[in-house]
Image (cartoon, rainbow, N blue to C red):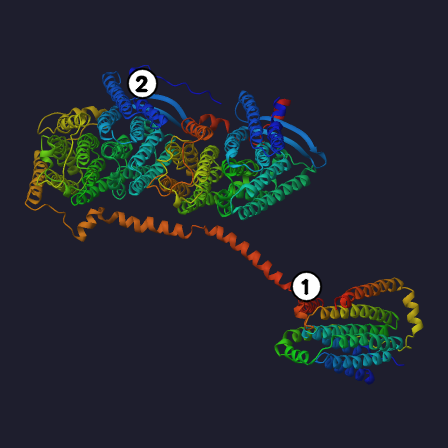
Amino acid sequence: MNAADPNGALIVAVILFSLGALGVLVRRNLLFMLMSTEVMLNAACLAFIAAGNRWHLADGQVMFIMIVAFAAAESAVGLAIILRMHAAGRATLDADTGNRLGG
Amino acid sequence: MMMFALPALVLIPFLGGFAAWIAGLRGATRPAWAVSLVTLILMLLVLVNVTLASLSAGTGGWFAHFSMPWIPLLGINLRFDLDGLGLVMLWLNALISFPCALLSARNVSERAGLFHFLLLSTIAGINGVFMATDLFLFFFFWELMLLPLFGIILIWGDAGRQRAVLKFFLFTQGSGLLMLLAILGLVIVNAQRTSVITFDYFLLSQTAMITPVAGVLMLGFFLAFAVKLPMVPFHAWLPDTYAASPAAASILLSGVLAKTGGYGMIRFVVMLFPGPAAHLAPVAMTLGVVGILYCAWLAVAQSDIKRLIAYSSISHLGFILLGVFSGTRIGMEGAIAQMVAHGLSTGALFVIAGLLEDRLGTRDMAKMGGLWPAMPQFSAFAMFFAAASLGLPGLGNFVGEFLVLMGTWQVSHTMTFFAAAGLVLSSVYSLTMMLRVFFGPRRSEASSPLGALSVPHVAVLGVAALLLLALGVYPQPVLNLSVPASPHSVSYAQEQAQ
Amino acid sequence: MTPIPAIVWGVSLVATLLPLVIACPLFVSIILMLTGGKLPARATTLLVGAGMGLCALFAVISAYSFLTGPDSLGALHVVLWNWMQVGNFTAQIALSLDRLSLVMMLVVSCVGFLILVYACAYMYDDPDIARFFAYMTLFVASMLLLVLASDLLAVFVGWEGVGLCSYLLIGFWYGEQANAVAARKAFVVTRVGDALFLLGMLLMATAVGSLDIPTLLAVGPHAPSTTLTLGMFLLLGGAMAKSAQVPLQTWLPDAMAGPTPVSALIHAATMVTAGVYLLARLHGLFVLTPAAMLACAVVGFVTILLAAGSALVQTDIKRILAYSTMSQLGYMYLALGCGAWHAAMFHLVTHAFFKALLFMAAGSIILRVHHEQDIFKMGGLRKDMPWVFTAFLIGSAALAGLPLITAGYFSKELILGSAYEVSPIFWAGALFGAFLTSIYIFRCVFIVFWGGHRTHAHGRSGMAMALPMAILSVLAIAGGWMEMPDAIANVHIFSNLLSPVLGALPQEHGTSLLIVGSLVPIAGVTIAWTLWRPRDVAPTPAESPAIATLRADWGFDTLYDRIFVRPFMVLAHLNRRDFIDRFYDLIAALTQGSGQAIARLQSGQVRRYAGWIAAGTVAALCLAV
Amino acid sequence: MNIVLELYGLIAIGATALAITRTIPVHGLLYLVVSLLALACMFDELGAPFAAMLEIIVYAGAIIVLFVFVVMMINLGQPDQLREKGWFAGGAWIGPGVIAALLMGLLVYGTQRSTMAVGTAGTPIGPQQVGLTLYGPYILTVELSSFLLLAGLVSAYHIGRRIGGKS
């Protein structure tokens, strides 16, 4: 396959990252915040892969694998917390009520 | 014997304090009190011994010396030297500490042992401050005298004590830090110059004379002592602290502790950095005058008797600043005489205020009034000390104030003029205090019967009155004795060697 | 360490007695203080009588032996001890007796003795009699120190000492708030003068190097004239406050709150004249500063007229006497300002006699009419108390200066003569003052002693009160005969006595001045009679706003209250919590506030944290890019 | 310019934008899957086929399914939708929008300032190469991520444990 232009990929990564950040900041629903985090992680992956392509090294993909592992752990824990909050009787998944400890 | 007398003056009260603590562990008040009194008497005996030996050595210069290595690596020694100024201050401390111990017996019923321990530690620290000639040791004692006092105020003070102690702590420790920096700076400068690390006062004084950064270093010392004295923009801690302290601590604070500031000004600012101090003098004197007037003015408006005395005390301390920085011998002598007289008169006034608070259960002068018939003897004493505090000639304070004014007059007529206006204001607040507390119609029924004074009170107030009178009519011995020795004069040790 | 200087006892009798003159009342005072009121009243009065008697006796003996002694023209010094010696400044506690201090010492000790004897009876029933006499004797001791001290600084000890005793005695009946307030006012106002005095001393000490009065007089004239003028102005300020001269006069009328013997001794005979004495002692320097002398004369001149005007409308008998004291002191200041030292001293002496007498008589009246002091509530007392009436009449005559028969006449004529010498305006003003004096004092006499009864007098004045009054009555008449103008009789005992110290008496003037001066008091008495002679209706004080102002001391009190006292107190109360302290509190509050503001960031809201992280990233990128 | 790459990029961006603005979680998740698939295609275009496969299998296949499970378990309903709409009030966008825009602008500026030259045309990097690198120089990282996964496992188990006990 032909090597693609990593610049374009980088811009896409940046836009995706910003969108993810926007999601985290805007959404009050914990579920969507976790999803936005995933988006940000993916954007980082894209940047790594693009860089790996540019230098023609496998390290980019290694980093991708690490990120995937991290994302898996993070979403597992995050979702567990959401479940727990739900089970504890928290009516909504509103993140802004998270400061009322005791749930 | 003389060799070990100086460290003994520090060790005796400190160890005595431990003994009092142990004696008071059972909860009984009496044994702790007895131990503390015995300790003070022992200390007094040692002091008498030192004084006799010093007098035989003649006036001027350094009387006694003690030195022992402490941390040789950094050139820190346990070094004590005694000159006339130190001796007079030691006497003041010894005299003031007696009423503290004598009268505290009544006020303190809880944890008396601890109280006596803290009190005696403070006294030990003050003694050390007046003798230490190793700057590190000086700083050590400087802190040692303050820390127990925080404890005393915090445990036995009145309702506003926490805030007061916080203020006291921030001011004194903050300024103490500046002094530590100045000490270290001086040591480093000296080490660069002579490649010898030492904290010795006499050696450092050589460097202090010539170093170009002397001005900055001096400011560090100056600020620490200005806060302690206190000088006017830094006085805010004092009224709160005095008002919140238990009687013994107020007496000690106003009687001696404030004088450590004046002592430090003489020994570590004017004597150590004569050049920069002369440059600073107009500022310091102006602040002194401002303090005299401003605090006298504030004193007039106070309704809390302890705060009134506190402000009057700051006002009088302005004279010390004025005298020390007047740069004249006469002003310096006046400042020293003022320190002694002020220690006695203000200490006595705080004894009186403490007793009033004790008997009436309030410090608010609006609730007093017409107390003279109820306690004539006591009121007469109050009148005496009020007169002393307004600078009545024939009493000690006048000697100090007159000499200070005389010294100031030679430097600036304007400042003297304003300082003399302070004399008028001092009569206003002193007499206002008398008017509101003792004269006028009886305003309230006392919470407890007012009765006669106890024997210790009469003794304490009587002795203070006699000493003030003696200082007022025949101050010459004190004036002769209290000449501060210069760091450049031959030290006692060298003299002995010759 | 210098050895304690041995007390230098002079060989002569005088040198031995002189310290004792001061020590006698001082010891009495100390004993009374230490016993703390436990002595019975009889023992107290005996002790006081004995102590003061000894004091007066010693004073008379030492005066006699001094005048008959070898150096009766010079001065005798008794150095007690070195007070302070710092650098090249030395102050000694030393007494010196010359002819000037001798006169003053005699006045203080003898008049003092008489007044204290009177007071023994006056205060006998007061429960606090011991305290009263402790203060009184302390006052006499301080006053004698003031008079005899040879060092200005030691004079200052006495100066402040009498001030303190005056304060204590004005506020003696402290149960009344007003008395204690008046006492404080007296002390503070005189303290203003004391501060000026102190500054004057500092100036002189710096210029001359010593405060020893003989040294000052010897070396002082060589000082620069501006220094000298300034110094004399400052000392004059101190003297004026003590003598209640305009503009520092406001304390004296209020000082009448004290017991009447106090007013007699302190606020008429002795303390208030201390300023006159001081200036007379320093006349050698004073004469070199014409500006200060002129100021002194003007002050005296103004005071004469203002005080006489106020006295004219007072209703309180003691306040009338207080204003008259002020006015008479004005005469002394006028005399001093005109360089008539003899006249000033002579008037001081005669004034001490007749004013003490007047106060004693007034005290007797007050005591017997149940402490009523309003003259319009008295009346017809001539028949109830003939002897007191006689004494009061003699005192009034002397105060008014009725010609030939009274002491006041001769001393006032001496002053008028010297005033004419300087300026006819001074003379005319002083003469007008004398006119007013005779009006106001005889107004008082006619209202109090003539007319119908408006109050009931009881009891009798005892022997101890009558005798001093009798003696002073004699002195108030005969005291003037020791110094008469040549036109009447060539008697110059007083001026001859003082000439060695004060210089020769200046040349006298013709008899025309004397005649005018004699007629004016008589005219005044006549006018007083026409205005206030007994009528059918009871006299009432005239009322109008102008008179109210006049009665309130020309509004000086209100003015000072508005200008100084009230702003001072109001501002002090506004700033009671100390704005510097507030400033530190502000710093503390700011620190605390910012801490809380930052703590609020720790909200527990994940989104906010994320926002901050993002913002931080943006900031970091901004820096990095 | 590689048009295909840009196209995939646009799809990813569009899908993501839709994903984060949905009010119904399942819709959001579906858009997210689309976005992930587009990204996988980009990976493949960028010469990382192994990563593309992993992206589809692990991300889209495992993690998103986990999300779906959770969505099913917490059973969100109509009121939640309305509330979500309420949370989208205009004001809520301003702050985050500004920050995100700034972030984007800065990152774009930063990455484009030093333009990356198009790399040397090379063959795609296969799984073998990746595996060798992973278990060669990066072995320590692998171990660390195993810790991380273990920790995630334990904590997820611990947090979720008491749900049953409570009901």
Disc 1 target residue? A102
The residue type indicated by label 2 comes to Ala
3D distance between C-alphas at marks 2 and 1: 97 Å
Q: Pick the quarter of the image with the C terminus of chain C.
A: bottom right
Quadrant hosting residue B365 = top left
Label 2 chain ID: C
Image side of residue B457 versus residue A93, left or right: left
Q: Is residue C207 visible?
A: yes
- Residue at 32 percent of width and 17 percent of height: C16
Quadrant hosting residue D78 = bottom right
Quadrant hosting residue C509 = top left
Q: Is residue C73 visible?
A: no
Disc 2 target residue? C15
Q: Nearer the viewer, mark 2 or mark 1?
A: 1
Label 1 chain ID: A
Tell me the SS state at disc 2.
Answer: helix
Residue C431 rendering spot, x and y as whole percentages: 13, 40
Residue D69 rendering spot, x and y as whole percentages: 79, 76
User: Alpha-carbon neighbours of circle 2 within 10 Å: few (<14), some, or many (≥20)?
Assistant: many
Residue B378 rendering spot, x and y as whole percentages: 40, 33
The answer to whether C128 is drawn above or below residue A37 in the figure is above
Q: Residue furthest top?
A: C11
The residue type indicated by label 1 comes to Gly
C408 and C544: which is toward the camera:
C544
Image side of residue B17 versus residue C11, left or right: right
